[in-house]
Image: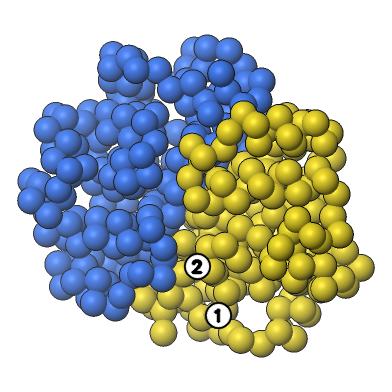
Amino acid sequence: MAHIELPAGLPGISGGFAFRPETAKPMRELAHVLLHEPNSLTPGERELIAAYVSSQNDCYFCQTSHGAAAACHLGGEDVVRRVKTDFENAPVSPKLKALLAIAGKVQRDGKLVTSEDVERARREGASDVEIHDTVLIAAAFCMYNRYVDGLDTWQPRDAGMYVQMGQHLAEHGYLKSSQR
Amino acid sequence: MPHIALPENQPGIRGAMAFRPETAKPLNDLVEVLLRGQNSLSPGERELIATYVSYLNDCHYCQSIHGAIAAAHLDGDEELVLRVKADFQYADISEKLKALLVIASKVQRDGKLVTAEDVGKARSQGATDIEIHDAVLIAAAFCMYNRYVDGLATVQPRDEAMYRERGKMVARDGYVRISKTYLPAEPVER
């Protein structure tokens, strides 16, 4: 049972959002800009960063739902699993590997990011906006993950539900709830 | 020097926000609701939670500016801000706020560390569900803002007077209104 009385039947962050629409609105808008709106990083690449950071934070709901969204964009779960376990050897671009290395450091502490990390990303073709967005996606998921876990929201173990949710997120983004 | 080419003369998060106004908007809207919106926790209490979490995350810019904003809301009581950071259990704040700071400090490390006992303690000191929700989300949100500010290696001046003055302005005007002074003007809709 969640720590506070959240609306029943809504998994993960949807429960927190329905409980407090005033804070849900900017949180949805932030996720939508970061993960869904046009960007030189594809939605699949950005969802992989979100899923990776959420797995480093050990947040079941977020890593599963964003992993499902990434799988939907990229046409398979295998790449998501491999990014989570060992992204340096996963089938993703050298640029995305360099960005995931930055994201992994931000997840622990922003101060760990070095100019060498940023240089590596630049050498692989990352732009300043892409580096900025990687840092902010990683930082933002340190918020979303703590919010979902800190309220002890309902995080069902139901693979089919996450696949559906991932499809909804991949198609429609984050402004409206995927829960009917 | 920042890791990417941020606008000059804008310290801390302001430089990052001016660089990317599209994400600045929801970031400012969120902090405005959390720290200044209608709430049974006072703005000073909420700024203390933000300051404490930023201190635990060792983010110089955020703990300095939110400490200054907290002090501005609390009749200039900078001593109280220092005491909350050093050991909030012995600071002159309510038992309810102490219980919420315990929850916030656990969220700062990992949301899963918050126990039913922590929440029960806050409730027995009079905290409502919304206050508990907001303490969790303020702590979570500052784990984002702190990492954003540090992760880009933004400019973080060591100038207490600057934070004190800025803190008074933000306490008076709020986050969204003051953002108009450093964000590019929004394009006119045609």
Q: Foreground residue, A77 or A174? A: A77
Q: Give the vertical position of B22 relative to A67 (above or below).
A: below
Q: How many marks?
A: 2
Image position, residue B180 (x, y; %): 67, 65
Q: Amino acid at mark 2?
A: Val
Q: Which chain is blue?
A: A
Q: Which residue does the image show at 66% across and 20% down from the upper left?
A: A5
The tint chain B carries is: yellow
Residue B178 percent coordinates (x, y): 72, 66
Does residue B172 appear left or right of residue A43 in this picture?
right
Q: Is residue B177 visible?
A: no
- Residue B6 percent location from the top left of the image: 44, 76
Question: What residue lies at 49% left-to-right and 37% top-to-bottom?
Answer: B112
Residue occupied by mark 2? B149
| Placement of B153 over or under B183, stated as above or below | below
Q: Residue at x 74, y 76 (%)?
A: B166
Where residue B17 sits in the image (x, y, percent)?
Answer: 53, 65
User: Which corner quadrant of the image does residue A104 belong to?
Assistant: bottom left
Name the foreground residue: A144 vs A127: A144
Tell which subunit mark 1 falls on. B
Q: Which mark is residue B156?
A: 1
